[in-house]
Amino acid sequence: MANDVPNIDLALKPILQFPDVWQNLTYIAGYFKIILALIVITSVSNEFSYGTARQNIIDGISRREWLFSKIGLAKVLALYSTLLVIVIGFILGYSQGVQVDTATIFPRMDYVLAYFIELIVYFIYALFLALLLKRTGLSIILLLVYDFILEPILSWSVPDSISNFLPMSTIDNLNTFPFSKYLGNPIEAIVSLEQLVWAVGYGIAFIVFSYLILKSKDL
Amino acid sequence: MQKILTTENLSKNYGILKALDKLSLNVTKGDVFGILGPNGSGKTTTLGILLGVTNATSGSYSWFEKGKNDHLRKKIGALLDKPNFYPHLNGFQNLALIADIKDLKSPKIHEKIEISGVSKFVNRKFGTYSTGMKQRLALAATLLGEPEVLVLDEPTNGLDPEGIADVRELILKIANQGITVIMSSHLLDEVQKVCTHVAVLKSGKKLYEGQVQSLLAGSDGIEIASDNMAQLEKVLSGFIGIEQIEKKQGTFKVRLKDGFKASELSSFLITNGIDITHFSHQKGSLEQEFLHLLSENRA
Ligand SMILES: Nc1ncnc2c1ncn2[C@@H]1O[C@H](COP(=O)(O)OP(=O)(O)OP(=O)(O)O)[C@@H](O)[C@H]1O
Ligand SMILES: [Mg+2]
C-alpha cells in the first residue's frame, strides 16, 4: 500500500494558506477541546463537592439560572478558543508569503463557525456528564471512555447512516480529516449543514437533560 | 400579623423512610421560631425544602405569602447544615460573591464582617478556616442584604463557648430589630434561651407547636417531703389541681394543672395537717418538657 502514496512535499501544499488554513487549523484545534472540557467538568463537580451549588440556590437563584451560569462558562471557553483560532489563522495565512485578497481569505470560514459549535456542544456535553455524576474523576473517565471506546464500538456495530449521527461523531463530522486531499483524495470543503443542525440539536438536548437532572435531584 | 412562612403537610420520603411526615407550620413576623428535635428528626430536611435545595415528596410551603419563587430567597439569610464557600477564595471575596447573587446594591460587607467577628481572618482563604471560623463567616453571609428572615440550621454548631454566647447574643439582637428567625437545634437550652416559638419534631412528625412559654407553663415542678410520706401522699391526691405525682427518693414530685399555684398547694397541705419538711418550687425547663413529650410519643 505504501508505494501507492504519491511522493508529496508538504511544503508545496497550501496547508497553511488561505482559505485551507481555516479548515486545517480548526481540525487540529479540535483536539484541544478535551482539555477545556476538563475545566468545565472540574468547575461543575467542585460546585457540588464544595456545596457551593447548594449555597447558590439557597442564596436565591433558581436551578435554571445556575445551569445557565455554567453554560455561560462553556460559551466563554468556546468563544475565546474560537477567537484564538481566528487570530492564529490570520497570522499563519498572512505569513505564507502568498498574495491574499478577500476572495481567498474568507471562503471556508464556515469551519470557524463549525469549530465554535463543536466546542460549545462538547462543553455542554461535559457539563451534562458532570451534573450526572457530580464527581470530577468519574466524569472525566466517562467522557474519555465514551469518546474513545464506547461510541467507536457503537459506530462499528451500526450502519453509517446512524453512526454519523451519534453525538461524538456528529461533533467530529463538522470537520472531518481534511489532509487526505493533499494526497489526492477529494474531501468535503464545506461544513455539512445537516451535521451542524444535528450538533446544535444535541447541544439543546444536553441542556434539557442537564436541567431535568438538576431539577429532580436534591442538592 | 404578617405571615412569614406557612407549610402545609410537607413530607419527604427517602425510600421507605419518612424523613418528614405531614409537617404544617406557621411562622409570623418577629417570631424566633425554634425547630427542636433529636438527631435525625428531620430538621435539616425541613429547612432544606424551605430553602429550595431538597425536593419535597408532597405538601407545600409559602414564603411571605408569595409562594416558593426562587428569588424570594434573596430576602432570606440562610445557613443550612454546614458552611459552603469557595475554598480558594478568601472570606471577603466569598461574601462579595453572595452579595452579587442577592443583587445587593450596597451590601455593607464590612459591617457584617465586624458584627460576626470574622475581621481577623476575612482576608485568608476560606480553605484554611477552622470549623468555628467557617461557621462565623456563614453567619456573616446570612446577614448580607438586610434579610427579612434568618434561617439557621444549628447555628452554634462547632463553636466554642464564647462563640456560642456570641451567636446567641447576635440572634437576640437581630430578633430585637424585628427580623424573623427560624432556627433548628437539638439543644433545648438553646431554644429556651433564644426562641419565642417552638415546633418539636420527632421522626419527622410534629409533636408540638406553639409558644415556648406555653410549653413551659404548667410544667413547673414542686418537690415536697414530709416525715409522714404515706399521709402526705393521701392528702396530695386529694388536691384537685394535681396533674401528676411522681415518687422520687423520699420526696414527691408534683406537677400542677394549668392555673394552680404552688402557694395554693402548700396552704392546702398545711390546712390538712401535713408537717412539711421540704417544699421547693422548680421552674420548668424545656428539657424536662421535651423529654416528657418524647416519652409520651414513644412508638
Ligand atoms: N440524602 C438522604 N438520603 C437518605 N436519607 C436521608 C438523607 N438525608 C437525610 N436522611 C434521613 O432523614 C432523616 C432526617 O434527617 P435530617 O438531616 O433532616 O435530621 P436532623 O433533624 O437535621 O438531624 P441532626 O440533628 O443530626 O442534624 C434521617 O433519618 C436521615 O438519615
Ligand atoms: Mg441537621
Image (cartoon, coloured by chain):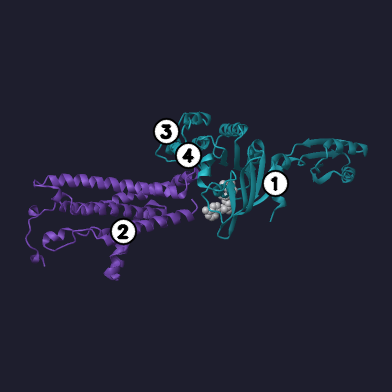
Q: CA distance from mark 3 to mark 1?
A: 43 Å
Chain holding disc 3: B
From the rendered image, report the letter of the chain displayed in cyan: B
Mark 3 touching mark 4, by CB under 8 A? no
Residue reaching furthest front?
A: A103
Position of A207 compared to B165: left or right? left
Residue found 12% across the figure and 44% down from its top:
A95
Q: CA distance from mark 3 to mark 2?
A: 44 Å
- The image's mark for residue A199 is 2
Q: Nearer the viewer, residue A98 or B113?
A: A98
- The image's mark for residue B124 is 3
Residue assigned mark 1:
B291
Mark 3 touching mark 2, by CB under 8 A? no
- Tell which circle, 1 or 4, labels the residue nearer the N-terminal end: 4
Q: Nearer the viewer, residue B162 or A146?
A: A146
Amino acid tagged 4 = Lys
Residue assigned mark 4:
B102
Q: Quadrant of residue A108?
A: bottom left
Q: Nearer the viewer, mark 3 or mark 4?
A: 4
Amino acid tagged 2 = Ala
User: In the image, residue A39 lies at what x, y percent?
Assistant: 33, 48
Chain holding disc 4: B
Residue found 16% across the figure and 51% down from its top:
A21
Mark 1 touching mark 4, by CB under 8 A? no
Residue found 70% across the figure and 41% down from its top:
B211
- Tell which circle, 3 or 4, labels the residue nearer the N-terminal end: 4
Chain holding disc 2: A
SS type, badge 3: loop
